Amino acid sequence: MNAVKILSSKTIFCLFFMILIVAPFLNLGDYVIHVIILFMYYAILGLAWNIIGGFAGQLLLGQSVFVGLTGYTCLMLLIFFGIPIWMGMIFSFGVVTMFSLFIGYPCLKLRGPFFALATISVAEAVKALYMYFDKYTGGTFGLWIPKLGTNPHVGFYKLPRVHEGSPLFYLQFENKLPYFYIFLIFLAIAVLVSYKIEKSDFGLLLRAIKDDEDAAKCLGVDTHWLKMKALILCAIVSSMAAAAYVMYIGYIEPISIFSLDLSLTPVIVTILGGVGYTAGPIIGALIYTPLSEFIRAEFGTTYAGAHLVILGALLTILALKSPEGLVLSILKRRKS
């Protein structure tokens, strides 16, 4: 069995999810559970980016815009209308789909660094809008999930409506365990979507675009529409991760949620594990998340931003030495 088949094995995926299912019952502690939740969050974002960046070869550097749009859509519907986040997530699928069509049509006509710069610009522009309309978004103060029985706030302004209802209906829990399994369900959906694309004719056409877009056009492939479909799927999968993250954290603000740092994390995770394979972002997130948390804990308080410098240096070394991804390179070398 070659390296690619090993990484794509259904048995490996089943074993992986079985371990995650029983993980909360191993007395790992709240912090370890938190790190596993972050791992699943980054893995879902990585799987989403891999659709457009890994399969189709389009360097998307503005993925945070889908995360931010979903987060604000969910919280604004909750705060102003009392609609729970899980219902807001369904509505946000339509929002990010329409937004993907709106920005994808012109931006996906660009290639290489020009497309990457365009997506960064879009994310920054949307961030500025959400900071400006602070009457509805809370501006730089952001929005947060109100406790049941209290009045929602938008910045310093308290709304007259009281946030009431069942904790189960609003998916507001006191411990991390329910959120752990929400992330696990969304990760399973993201893996299934990615795996189906990887094994489908659609995935084959995306790889053709990645290898040589002009040649694919000459063969009659509608490359622009295929890239649009990949971007929409990326946006919807990113939206699932964002909704789960907002439920878990309970707070959102524009500077961090629309940041370039958040857009780069799925790229790092995917490149670390292996671009263009479903297992790549999962393995990358498995390496990146504990490493990032360790570096942040050790150096973050003393040297602000040190974790970004160290991770950036590691990514540069990896890109030079193992452009296929760390794990895939190791498996191929062991076979040879």
Image: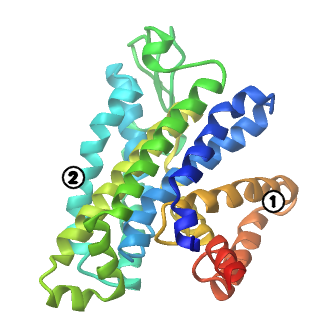
In the image, residue 156 above or below residue 204: above
Image mark for residue 98: 2
Identify the residue at image location x=55%, y=53%.
Answer: 43
- Regarding mark 2 in the picture, which secondary structure is present there? helix
Image mark for residue 295: 1
Identify the residue at image location x=81%, y=59%.
Answer: 295
Q: Position of residue 89 (x, y in %)?
A: 36, 35
In the image, residue 85 above or below residue 323: above
Horizontal side of 55 relative to 19 (left or right) equals: left
In the image, residue 252 above or below residue 315: above
Query: As shown in the figure, which amino acid type bears the numbered disc 1?
Result: Ile
Which is nearer the eye, 138 or 60?
A: 60
Does residue 280 appear anywhere in the picture?
no
Identify the residue at image location x=28%, y=82%.
Answer: 110
Which is nearer the eye, 111 or 57?
A: 57
User: In the rendered image, which quarter is residue 318 located in?
Assistant: bottom right
Q: Position of residue 125 (x, y in %)?
A: 37, 62
For marks 2 and 1, give the CA distance.
38 Å
Q: Earlier in the sequence, mark 2 or mark 1?
A: 2
Query: As shown in the figure, which amino acid type bears the numbered disc 2?
Result: Met
Q: Position of residue 242 (x, y in %)?
A: 46, 44
Which is nearer the eye, 336 or 68?
A: 336
Q: Position of residue 32 (x, y in %)?
A: 77, 39
Mark 2 Cα-neighbour bin, 10 Å: few <14, some 14–19, many ≥20: some
